[in-house]
Image: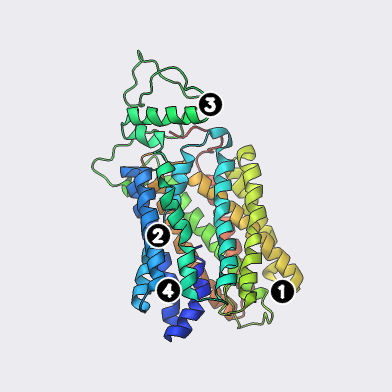
Amino acid sequence: MEIMILSFIGPAIKSEWNLSPAQETLLTSVVFAGLLVGSYSWGFISDNYGRRKGLLGIAMLASVAGLLSAFSLNYLSLVTLRGLVGIGLGSGPVCLSWFLEFIPASNRGMWMVVISIFWTLGTIFEAALAWMVMPRLNWRWLLALSSVPSFAVLLLYGLAPETPKYLCTAGKMADAAHVLEKMAQRNGTNLPSGMLVSDETATPDEEVIIPEHTPLLSSTVNKSGSSSFLMLLSTELIRTTLLLWFLFFGNSFIYYGVILLTSELNSQEARCGSTLLLLEHAQDASLYVNVFITSLAELPGLLLSAVIVDRVGRKISMAIMSILTFIFLLPLLTHQPVTLTTVLLFGARMFANGTFGVACVYAPEVYPTSLRATGAGIASAVGRIGGMVCPLVSVGLVTGCHQTAAIFLLEVVIVLSIVCILLFPFETKGKRID
């Protein structure tokens, strides 16, 4: 919600404060800059100090800065506060890592995709909220109301336990056992017999619970002498890390590229040289309806991802949906009728978002607990760069009457992303994370 909101309020703020186009653009750019900082920072905090501490910091920063931005006295204060909101919004990898560490391997992929559906639901809800608020009240009310979900996270923070996996990695075995006992009690069952010990302290004479599957990577990571970032580039992880970075960059580039083309090619005029971004500067009902309807295209892709991700695996799921995205875009190398163009772009957006959803499942799975949020966070940050670069490239191509070149560029990025998917060293379907 907080990412989409500036697209609705930007024109109103520009008119009220007489902003230049560059100043209006900065309102959005500063949020993406905050996302870049937050994706790494919150990952580092949660890997070193706990998932709950990361969640608490995120909720406090996003909620307070989001609400205060509704009372901004001038442009500078608004830009500063929205930048802080962006840092808070870089929390995605932390939330996904926290959720991942509670889910059993058998249906982990499905539930991880299901949780990502709330991103799309937030976009749809924000469009509906703006549709109701902006014509009747003003942009300050929309900012204030949009901060309510962040305050809800803050209020519900007390219900979120620390993950046993993190506690075990931190050597807090008694705390981990306490959380597991509460989980068992809540689910009306009993814990298996035996004593909970870490991988590092287990001895042949101790009675331990033997996992059904071998973990993907060792949970023992020595952090002395090097940063988390450098450990992601260690011999064991560098291949996976670099492939993930390009995959996230490519997925963001493709996703935002399809959104741009959807708005431009489906505009009423749809003429060369009149590029209209998805959230064009129009303060009428068509703006909100456009976002509402185009966002609905993402739901079928995410539902398909949830169905197949635990059946065929992460790599095959991403490859299938990337290929389908490629197929849907292929006819657009030449100009097509408006109706067919709409269908093709909706299909491409559907499968592009589905690929993104599975990638967000795969990224935290491939890293050990001590690096999980940091690794997924940096991959997400690289993806944000792709989202920032794509409009710069695509706008220039479309404005210059180069639809074919824009589509060709997207197709090339899709092919390279598929190659990355095939080169990943292992599949995480059904595997135990450390």
Mark sitting earlier along the chain (4/1): 4
Front-most of residues 386 and 409: 386
Mark sitting earlier along the chain (2/1): 2
Q: Amino acid at mark 1?
A: His
The residue that mark 4 highlights is 27
Q: CA distance from mark 4 to mark 1?
A: 34 Å
Front-most of residues 175 and 327: 175
Q: Secondary structure at mark 4?
A: helix
- Residue 369: x and y in percent read 39, 38
Q: CA distance from mark 3 to mark 4?
A: 50 Å
Residue 323 in view (yes/no): no
The residue that mark 3 highlights is 188
Q: CA distance from mark 2 to mark 4?
A: 16 Å
Q: Residue at x 48, y 71 (%)?
A: 141
Give the foreground label among 2 and 3: 3
The residue that mark 2 highlights is 62
Residue 103 in view (yes/no): yes
Q: Which mark is residue 335?
A: 1
Up-down relation of residue 264 to residue 199 (above or below):
below
